[in-house]
Image: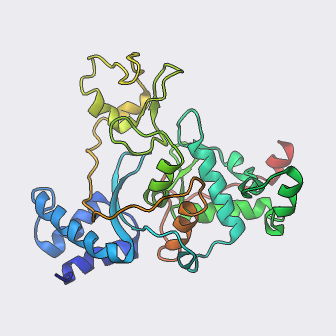
Amino acid sequence: MALSWRHHVLIQALLSRGPMTEEDFHAVFAAVSGKDPVTHRQLFNEVLLKINKELAYVQFELRACQNQYDGKVYYGMVNNVADEQSKLGTKYSVPQIAFYKGVVEAIVQDVATQGCISSIDALHIQLENQVQNCQSSQDTQSRIPAAFKSFTMSQKEKTLNDLIKDRWLCYTSDGRIGLGLRSFFDLRSWFFSNDVPSCEVCNEAGVKASVCSNEGCTVRIHYYCLKKKFPQRKGSRACPGCGTEWPRSEFEVDHLDVPEQTQVPSADLSSRKRPRRMKAEAVAAVQSQSETQNEAPCGPTQRRRLRSCKTESVET
């Protein structure tokens, strides 16, 4: 059965506005259906399932995603294909995409699992590290594109601001650089294929999470998932991996009243094998939808620009 105009409105809202908060998306659904999606959850899920069955033919998917910095649920459209055709609509150059890849890798490799890096660290990302499959240092130098070598600090600064504006990256509450909403939507498969440890509760990548105090234990839990795992504030908080008492964090207070994450029903399609590196997933993620919106970054509400780091970089 073909999609109705109501389905088309939901799809168009996400395509034109980009990721929407759960509250805003529910408001659109209520406007076109006359039903409250909270009290008519089954109807809401059936509508989304029908949309995803149709979108599966063109390798798109409507997803719900939880922002790991504030715990809020968002809905968005995702292109599930990482191919050459999906790269044609991008406004980002090859060096800019390499820079984005380097920033993302630096964020997810943070052993403290704070999910962010400083703007200075971001601007010092070396594009040369994105050159793959090199056999020797001499071979590495010969393979580095000239555009990588000439990518200046001011170009990195501008690219960083563009990525934040387009919501591939964001400012965290303390002014550091974190992953944007669109990265959480589009890089889900990349997180798993690159062994980014998952949250013990929701099984999503634990980019920003609380970790076990036992250094030999790799268990991590999102701050907004701690309430589900340890509902009693004064009860036992044993680590599910090693039994060590789970540490309390100041971040837990901020996420005590965060609602549970919403799961969007999707079409049951066989997943394609994802590469170990970011070459396919992350590149296509930046490139597939970068022209479709011009929205404000997450983080503090006031617009902020990166201060020039040229002088600071020289001193460093």
Q: Residue at x 55, y 42 (%)?
A: 174
Q: How many marks?
A: 0
Q: Residue at x 50, y 60 (%)?
A: 297
Quadrant where the C terminus sits is top right
Residue nearest the viewer, comparing 291 with 287? 287
Name the outermost residue toward the right.
Answer: 138
Residue nearest the viewer, comparing 286 with 313? 286
For residue 94, what is the image quadrant?
bottom right
In the rendered structure, the answer to whether residue 160 lies left or right of residue 142 reads: left
The location of residue 19, given as percent across then percent down, is 39, 64
For residue 250, what is the image quadrant?
top left
Residue nearest the viewer, comparing 233 with 146? 146
Does 46 appear above or below 170? Answer: below
In the rendered structure, the answer to whether residue 268 lies left or right of residue 203 reads: left
The location of residue 118, given as percent across then percent down, is 65, 44
Specify how the rendered protein is coloured: rainbow
Confirm whether residue 273 shows in the render: yes
Does 171 appear above or below 40? Answer: above
Quadrant where the N terminus sits is bottom left
The location of residue 200, given as percent across then percent down, is 37, 35
Q: Residue at x 37, y 31 (%)?
A: 252
Confirm whether residue 175 shows in the render: no
Does 81 appear above or below 115? Answer: below
Q: Residue at x 35, y 24 (%)?
A: 240
In the rendered structure, the answer to whether residue 98 lies left or right of residue 174 reads: right
The location of residue 269, given as percent across then percent down, is 32, 65
